[in-house]
Image (cartoon, rainbow, N blue to C red):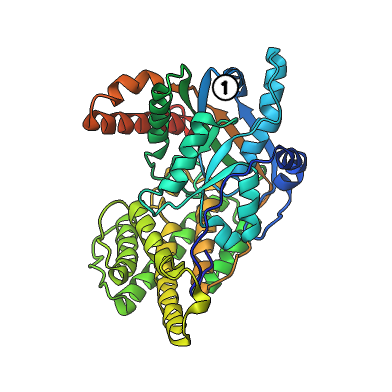
Amino acid sequence: MPQFVQQVQPPLEYIPSAYSPLLIRLAHAALPLLLRFRTRPWLTAGITQIQVDQAKTLVPLLQQFQAGQMRLLLAFRHVEVEDPLLGLYLLSRAVPRAARQQGIRLQRPLHTHFLYERGMPLWAGDWMGWFLSHIGGTPVRRGRRPDWKGLKEARQLLVNGELPMTVAPEGATNGHSERLGPFEPGVAQMGFWAVEDLAAAARPEAVVILPIGIRYSYVKPNWRRLDQLMTRLEADSGLSPQPIQPGDVLPEKVFSPRLMRLGEHLLGRMEQFYGRYSATKPATTAELDFTERLQLLLDNALQTAESYFHLPPTGTIVDRCRRLEEAGWTDIYREDLPNLEQLSPLDRGLADWVAQEASLRLLHMRLVECFVAVDGTYIPAKPTFERFAETTLLISDMLARIRGDKLPRRPRLGNRRAQITVGEPISVTERWPAYRTNRRSARAAVQTLTQDLQTALEQMIDPASGG
């Protein structure tokens, strides 16, 4: 949604899926341009190399799906906003090439239905809602527990749709190619719902979940461009810049203390902010390391918003963010005021005040979203250009939110390569007997399947360690 809402808004309308094969063919044709060039300020694009591993695994699964023998759910990693472009590449280029090599003919265009977060058209524009709908998307409100309308359509499409279904088990981007975000059980639950619906209809199709990993790296580390970005962030944060000097032959040795200095400074300033202006006073940070201080700060930021909406500070950070988002949307997109034009000037003004307050409180939650997967160990464990770049870009996102930038132009640090890894299929149907016993066994089956899916995606990041 926009950084700050000035006026109350009408209720959010549901956007039904209206898949258009013609639009998908146009998107497939335009894909090389979409990958390489920035078409929107919030996209960095610049993806000039793509490697796909094990695309051949997907070919027989799609063949069985198209033959009516299987229902297929693709579980994609969600690193950046460009991830859907890689999904288009996989299905429009890599899979057809692998199918030809195997002598298998697949119906075209190859595509999937998918879930997307209802807030995307709020910050990207109404055109985004129309576009996502016509390329097979189904919106869900992440904070509405549960969003039965969106889930009902997604469930129906998974069981009866002409296309497979794609869902991101992480639920949102985290900006880390080599670290998974918090997992949600929705993918596993959808798989079991599909088995249940097929069994009720006496249909023989199997249900399979296929994990698909995504990693980004830079074609050539551009330390000078990263240095320029870091210099700007230091200046914007009130620090004296420490640009790379001509004699610095090992930039990573320079950037590590420099980034830590910037992180410590920003952490201290935000601790001061919440200590002075927040209704929730932060606990002492004495003798805490960077990661502990950051987690405490995120907790205080969330409590600042939660106290306004009278929400309990319970659950994971992701759970709390989703609850806050729904509470804010309830005050901004007023379902209890379906016709705003009929309000008196007094009531309209008061409704605007409520929306403005809610929008302001949500900024604390948006700040937390920037750092949901950040800690003090990611870079020291592997001080690569990519990890420096990812963390610096997250700091840039944070400062843009604090400044109140509208659709900020994300810095580009060079051309990137992407690696797509198709994993091994996971049969949900084989796990059905364990799920159907009772509610307790159902929860355990969902939890186990979610953990197995997470493990599979972790191993695509680092096959040696699984993490």
Is 300 located above or below residue 219 in the figure? below
Residue 453 placement (x, y as % from top left): 41, 31
Residue picked out by circle 1: 65
Q: Farthest residue to the front: give it.
A: 342
Q: Quadrant of the C terminus?
A: top left
**Left or right: 297, with 42 as reference point:** left
Query: Which residue corresponds to the image point at 48% horizontal and 59% vertical from the top-left?
Result: 259
Residue 363 placement (x, y as % from top left): 43, 68
Query: Which residue corresponds to the image point at 76% horizontal and 43% vertical from the top-left?
Result: 30
**Which amino acid type is shown beneath numbered disc 1?**
Phe
Query: Which residue corresponds to the image point at 55% horizontal and 73% vertical from the top-left?
Result: 235
Residue 33 placement (x, y as % from top left): 76, 46
Q: Nearer the viewer, residue 254 or 144?
A: 144
**Left or right: 29, with 311 as reference point:** right
Q: Nearer the viewer, residue 208 or 75?
A: 208
Kind of element beneath mark 1: helix
Classify mark 1: residues with Cα within 10 Å, few (<14), some (14-19) or many (20+): many
Q: Farthest residue to the top: give it.
A: 103
Q: Nearer the viewer, residue 120 or 192?
A: 192
